[in-house]
Amino acid sequence: MADTTRVTDDSIKVRQLSHYQFSFRAGDAGSAGTWYLQLVLDQGAWEEIITLTADDADNLQDVLRSTETVYYDIERRLFMFGVTKPGT
């Protein structure tokens, strides 16, 4: 029996990061601001925006700059860095 499951954009849960952009929104006087990270996945097939702490934004930017291939699991909101073939 053939599998007739249809693959749609919504059914793909892990995508490759193509581009990213950090943004910062200032808070009210005396309040901390908010960091955002916009992810462009699979050359624009999917976009995601996540909210970060200042420390997370700093650390994540360091890792993104130094990692050639990054994947993002949409359902689990999980980054996967440094994809390596087994045995290397």
Image (cartoon, helix red, strand yellow):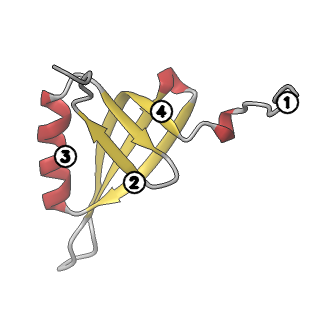
Number of other residues with Cα within 10 Å of mark 2, as a class: few under 14, some 14 to 19, many 20 or more: few
Which residue was labeled with disc 2?
Answer: 50
Sooner in the amino-acid sequence: mark 2 or mark 1 = 1
Residue bearing the label numbered 4: 15
Q: CA distance from mark 3 to mark 4?
A: 17 Å
Measuring 73% from the left and 30% from the top, which residue is drawn there?
Answer: 7
* Residue name at image x 67 percent, y 33 percent: 9
Residue at mark 4 to residue at mark 1: CA–CA distance:
22 Å
The location of residue 43, given as percent across then percent down, is: 49, 21
Q: Quadrant of residue 28?
A: bottom left
Whichever of labels 3 and 1 marks the residue nearer the N terminus, that label is 1
What crowding class fits label 1: few (fewer than 14 Cα within 10 Å), some (14-19), or many (20 or more)?
few
In the rendered structure, which disc, 3 or 4, sits on the residue that comes first in sequence? 4
Say which amino acid is labelled 1: Thr
Residue for badge 3: 60
Foreground pick, 65 / 16: 16
Residue sitting at the far bottom: 30
- Indicate which label's residue lies in the foreground, 4 or 1: 1
- The residue depicted at 19 percent of the width and 57 percent of the height is 56
First reached walking from the N terminus: tag 3 or tag 2: 2
Q: Which mark is residue 4?
A: 1
**Please, what secondary structure does the residue beneath circle 4 have?**
strand
Badge 4 or badge 1: first in the primary sequence: 1
Of badges 3 and 4, the one in the foreground is 4
In the figure, is residue 21 to the left or right of 14?
left
Residue sitting farthest toward the front: 1
Element type where label 1 sits in the image: loop
Q: Amino acid at mark 4?
A: Arg
Task: Locate residue 39, reporting x and y percent.
Answer: 40, 38
Residue drawn at 20 percent across, 72 percent down: 32
Instruction: Point out the image quarter for the N terminus.
Output: top right
Image vertical order of residue 74 relative to residue 82, above or below: below
